[in-house]
Amino acid sequence: MEQIQVSGGSSRNGAARLDTLPEDCISMVIYHTSPRDACVVASVSKTVKSAAESDLVWEKFLPPDYSSLVPRSLDFSSKKEIYLSLADDSVLIDDGKKSFWLEKGSGKRCYMLSAMDLKITWSDCPVYWQWNTVPDSKFKRVAELRDVCWFEIWGKISCGMLSKGTHYSVYLVFKRAGGRSYGFEDTPMEAQVGFVGKDAASKKFVVLEPIDMDKPSGYRYTSVSLTWVSREDRTRRLREVGGNVEEPKVRGDGWSEVKLGKVYIHDGGYDDDDDDGDEIEFSIMETQNGQWKSAMIFQGVEIRPMKEGGEMVITKGSNSDNI
């Protein structure tokens, strides 16, 4: 927010001028900023704080359908409290197949599509996949990989569900089953993110286990056999995909994530001329190697705004009013 600042000599004069306006006028000024800006400017004075915390301001930061997202059992005294509840904790929507929350500083929409809401090849066959319940998942069921050599997960989401004029990143959220996975070491997988029916999908390679180029040659266990993996094999596989591979990161909630790609939502979806009917599709697959893979749990795919200067970091909720 450039119009309202609270530090420095010249901005103190600007803050004083703001403080002389009627409270409803101050609210209208703050209305055109962001949740983070509203919290910052509230420190100027009691009058500005009252305006910055008004329902007029915070209802603008809420999604139009916010009343259907808030549990009726909860009682909130202000629109700001409702906003903070949607930013601190995600809520389940779409019959429990998706979770929704707001990015706290900007109010932009975030989603996770559960594994139940994704297309997973062979997921209806218990020999290859199992649908289980784990206590630290947002969702009722997660997909646990038993054994596959043909690995493929994909899904899509409507652009109308996302915040316009926003750069989004798409992440696969997963963790090892029983502390150890098989068949994912040194196995780059193809990931794509783009618009349905368009040619501009981004393509990259990712791994679900961190790459250790210093690991010595030796046998690697899969679920069905011993496989010899040498340093030369590891180097060759990376060279075949161009050497640029996205590696997973551990999140604050105990799960891991790997970035599948990114996409920009214009005011109308794919571009400014289209409507909200456009859809984003994303996928991750490995079908060429023939190596069996197992012992990995997939919670879903998360779609969240990119922060300026870097990626958002997922941590455990703090239930703090600070933005």
Image (cartoon, rainbow, N blue to C red):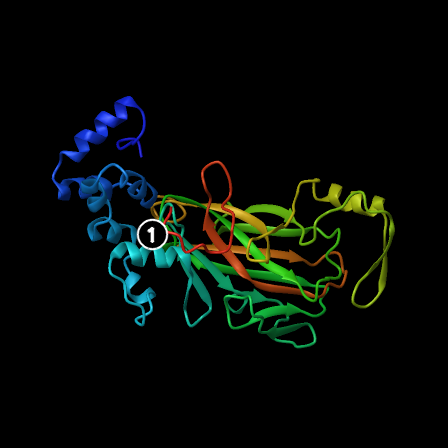
The front one of 279 and 303 is: 303
- The residue beneath circle 1 is 275
Q: Residue at x 24, y 45 (%)?
A: 52
Three-letter code for the amino acid on which mark 1 is drawn: Asp
Badge count = 1
In the depicted structure, whether residue 270 falls above or below residue 290: above
Q: Residue at x 45, y 65 (%)?
A: 98
Left or right: where does residue 223 sit relative to residue 271? Answer: right
Q: Position of residue 30 (x, y in %)?
A: 23, 41
The front one of 191 and 169 is: 169
Pick the quarter of the image with the N terminus. Answer: top left
Q: Position of residue 173 (x, y in %)?
A: 57, 58
Location of residue 159 by image quarter: bottom left
Left or right: where does residue 197 sit relative to residue 21? Answer: right
Res. 277 visible in picture: no
Q: Residue furthest top?
A: 9
Q: Residues within 10 Å of mark 1 (few under 14, many from 20)?
A: some
Left or right: where does residue 28 sit relative to residue 182? Answer: left
